[in-house]
Image: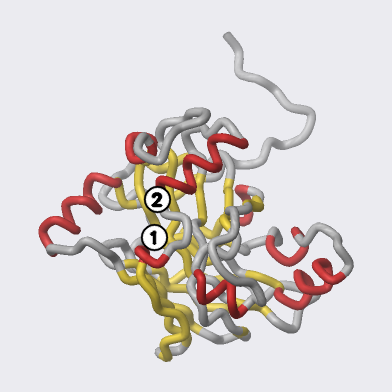
Amino acid sequence: MSSTEFVIPAPPPISLPVLGETKRFPVRRVFCVGRNYEEHAKEMGYTGREPPFFFMKPADTLVPIEAGRQGTMNYPSLTQNLHHEIELVVAVGLGGKNMSAAQAPAHIYGYAVGLDMTRRDLQNDMKKQGRPWEIGKSFEQSAPMGPVLPAAQWDQWAQSAGQKDAAIWLKVNGETRQTSHISQLIWNVGEILEHLSAAWELAPGDLIFTGTPAGVAAVKSGDVLLGGVDGLPELNLKIV
């Protein structure tokens, strides 16, 4: 059977490195959870354990960064207020619909560290007008990500380190901006997959940005962002 031919050049496939593997993780869709740490919700003007809500980024907004290397992101157009949001990212390996929180771990291939970069001024303008705010969230290079670590390896690290929780943090030019723990997620990973799979049929290759802690703030060209989640490869990014 001959391969499919297209009338224009087909876009390249989107994928992420997997730590310790030559094979890569293919990306299908990128889901993001909004306001999923209480302190961040408060700094955005909201309170409490609200029902989770989701938005999406195109897969080609990803900036894959290899372990131990520094990636780059171009400072985007139209904004004067580019914000960082460090997040734990879940990589789905087994799809499904209407899964329970207890079933969720069996559907997870691995985890990574990601940044949900935000043109905050554009996002806020759209919110005030009651309009969709993808222009603030879904622009080119708005989702830098480190390599995926298979879930079993993260579990092994947690057991060997005696860890039942993981810190999440971000430094800008060596100064700590964001810090919290994964246990502080309003909706934990299992609950997120339960809610998401009720609205969408999740599929292998889907990514889920699980939310950011308090401390989001502006960055500028020349800034270096170093972020991490305990046990996962760190994410190193320079804004150019």
Residue 186 is situated, as x and y percent measured from the top left of the image, at 47, 61
Which residue is at 41% across, 73% downward?
Answer: 227
**Which callout, 1 or 2, points at the residue further toward the start of the chain?**
2
Q: Tell me residue 180's x, y (percent).
A: 39, 75
Identified by mark 1, the residue type is: Glu
- Specify the quadrant of the image occupied by residue 132: bottom right
Residue 193 image position (x, y, % from top left)? 47, 43
Mark 1 surroundings within 10 Å by alpha-carbon count, few (fewer than 14), some (14 through 19), many (20 or more): many
In the depicted structure, whether residue 31 falls above or below residue 141: above
Q: Residue furthest front?
A: 48
Query: What residue is drawn where x is 36% and y is 34%?
Result: 103
In contact (CB < 8 Å): disc 1 and disc 2: yes
**In this orientation, which residue lies closer to the viewer: 198 or 26?**
198
Label drawn at residue 66: 1
Amino acid type for the residue under numbered disc 2: Pro
Identify residue for label 2.
Answer: 17
Residue 61 x, y percent position in the rendering: 62, 56
Say which of 170 and 37 sits in front: 37
